Structure formats: C-alpha cells, structure tokens
Amino acid sequence: MKSICGVTSTDSAEPPPSAAEGVIELSAVSKLERFLDQLRAFYGALPAPPRDPFTLFVWEVLSVHSTPYKRDAALAALKRIRALTPDAMWRAPQKKLEASVGLAGPYNEQRLRALRTGVDIFRRSPNLPAVIRGPVVPARRALKGIPQMGEGGAYRMLLFAADHAVLPVDAKVSRVARRLGFGDQQGSFTKTARSVREAVSTQLPASVDAYRHAFLYLAHHGAATCTETDPHCAVCPLVSNCPEGQKRDIHHGGHGGH
Ligand code: SF4
C-alpha cells in the first residue's frame, strides 16, 4: 500500500481515495469488534481467568454452581494454604482443603472428587502445560479426562493458559453470539459451538488478546444482561444493531431506545 506521508495533493498524480476505499477502511473494524468495544465501554475492565493451567482447572471446578464472589473466596483460601499446585493439593491436609473448597458453595463433595481426579492427571502428566501450548488437536486430547474440560472449559484452557487464539463457547457465549447474528442453533451443542466459532473467526484478528477480549465480554454480557429467559434489551448497549433485540423490541412495543 502506498504511503501518503509527505505527499501533498499537488505533487501527486494519483486520484484521491474513492468512496469505495473509504468504505473498506471503515469496515476494517468488524461488526463484532464494534459490539465488543461497546460492551467494553458499558462494563469497564473485566477480570480474566487464571493463566496457570492447574490454577485454571481449579478455578473451573470452583466456578460450577457458584458465584464469582464465592469462587474467588475459595480460590484465595486455597492460595493461602498453598494448595495451588498438583503436588501441593495432593499433600494438603484434608480438613483445610474441604474448608477452603467449601467457600465456593454447595456440592463440596463433587468438587473435591473432581479436584482429586484432576490432581492425579496433572501429577501423572508433568508435561501437560507444554503439550497444551502445542498443536490444538493433541492439546485437546491431553485435556480429556480432566473434569470440567468440555466445550467451554477446554477452550478456556487453550485460550488463557496455552495462548491459542480460540473461542471458548459455553452456554452464555453461544446465546449472546447467536442473538447478535454470529452462528446458528444446530442439532447438538458441539455443532452449535462450531458454528459460533466459525462465524466469530471471520470477525476477529487471529490474536490471542482479541479472542480473550471477545470471550470475556460475550460471557459477561450473557451473565449480566443478555440472560436466557429475559434478556434486558431495553438497557443493552447493543440493541440498535442486534437482530434479536430488534425482534423483542417490536414484540414489546418499541421501547428499545433507538
Ligand atoms: S439487545 Fe437483547 S438480545 Fe441483543 S445482545 Fe442485547 S440483551 Fe441480548
């Protein structure tokens, strides 16, 4: 591309940029990126999941049937008793472990069982952190058997702890993306997730930061505003360009504020 630096309108025989070129420049920022910018302005900065693979696994187990506040309290307690490596958790006194994990809420027994399974796998595979940083297919295979490593969890591991530019699609991300027009409902969650990932991949630069940013804001929006049964479209910053929001707005009498 030709640089225009130092070139005045009189010393160049080139015609000025056409309207079409202007359009190309404007569309360099995709529709999804504009939505994400709006969500960033609406919610402010959001915390990201841990970057260490084992800590992220523990975070996943603590997140199920919990709240961010309780999950973070449990994680902080595990950090205080220095149980956030596979060996350290394996050695940790059971009573202290139970008390710390219990801060995440109910299902303590299930959580402790899931942690024990994960600790065994991490201890048996000391090269797991290196493997998941390698090619995606063997990386996903290496995560099999670790609790909470489904569509959302495994891809969160790849994105946040292994620097892969992939989109974790859990129920919230799937819902928000499809309502905004990225991906379709398919016969199974796996196929739906693939459809969302394909649609999103056309809208984002292939950078880990872009995917982390997209995941954080889509997931948070799905939890805070674009809820499953009663999305709060009237206060949503995306309503004027959201197909689902427009439909709901029409059905509810046009109070969407656009
Ligand atoms: S307008 Fe409604 S359906 Fe669309 S993203 Fe916002 S809350 Fe979700």
Image (cartoon, rainbow, N blue to C red):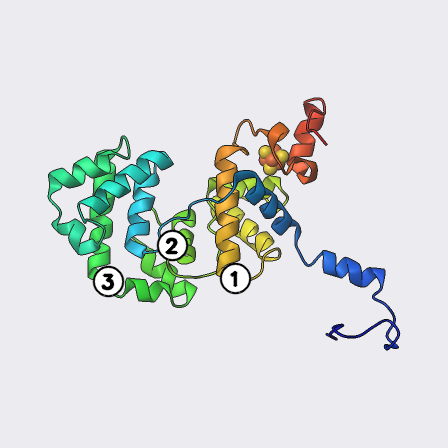
Callout in the foreground (3, 1): 1
Which residue in the protein does label 3 denote?
A: 125
Asked if labels 1 and 3 touch by Cβ distance under 8 angstroms, the answer is no
How many residues crowd mark 2 within 10 Å: few (<14), some (14–19), many (20+)?
many
Q: Position of residue 60 (x, y in %)?
A: 34, 45
Q: CA distance from mark 3 to mark 2?
A: 16 Å
**Can the viewer see residue 183?**
no
Asked if labels 2 and 3 touch by Cβ distance under 8 angstroms, the answer is no
* Lower sequence index among marks 3 and 2: 3
Q: Is residue 248 above or below residue 54?
A: above
Q: Residue 10 versus residue 221: which sits nearer the camera?
A: 10
Which residue in the protein does label 2 denote?
A: 157
- The image quadrant in which ligand 1 is located: top right
Q: Position of residue 170 (x, y in %)?
A: 46, 44
Looking at the image, how many numbered discs can be counted on the residues? 3
Which residue in the protein does label 1 denote?
A: 207
**SS label for mark 2:** helix
Q: Residue 250 versus residue 52: which sits nearer the camera?
A: 52
Q: CA distance from mark 1 to mark 2?
A: 16 Å
Q: Position of residue 158 (x, y in %)?
A: 40, 57
**SS label for mark 1:** loop
- 156 sits left or right of 236 in the view: left
Q: Amino acid at mark 1?
A: Ser
**Can the viewer see residue 133?**
yes
Identify the residue at horizontal 51%, vertical 55% (top origin): 211
Quarter of the rendering containing residue 237: top right
- 157 sits left or right of 201 in the view: left
Q: Amino acid at mark 2?
A: Met
Q: Amino acid at mark 3?
A: Ser
* Lower sequence index among marks 3 and 1: 3
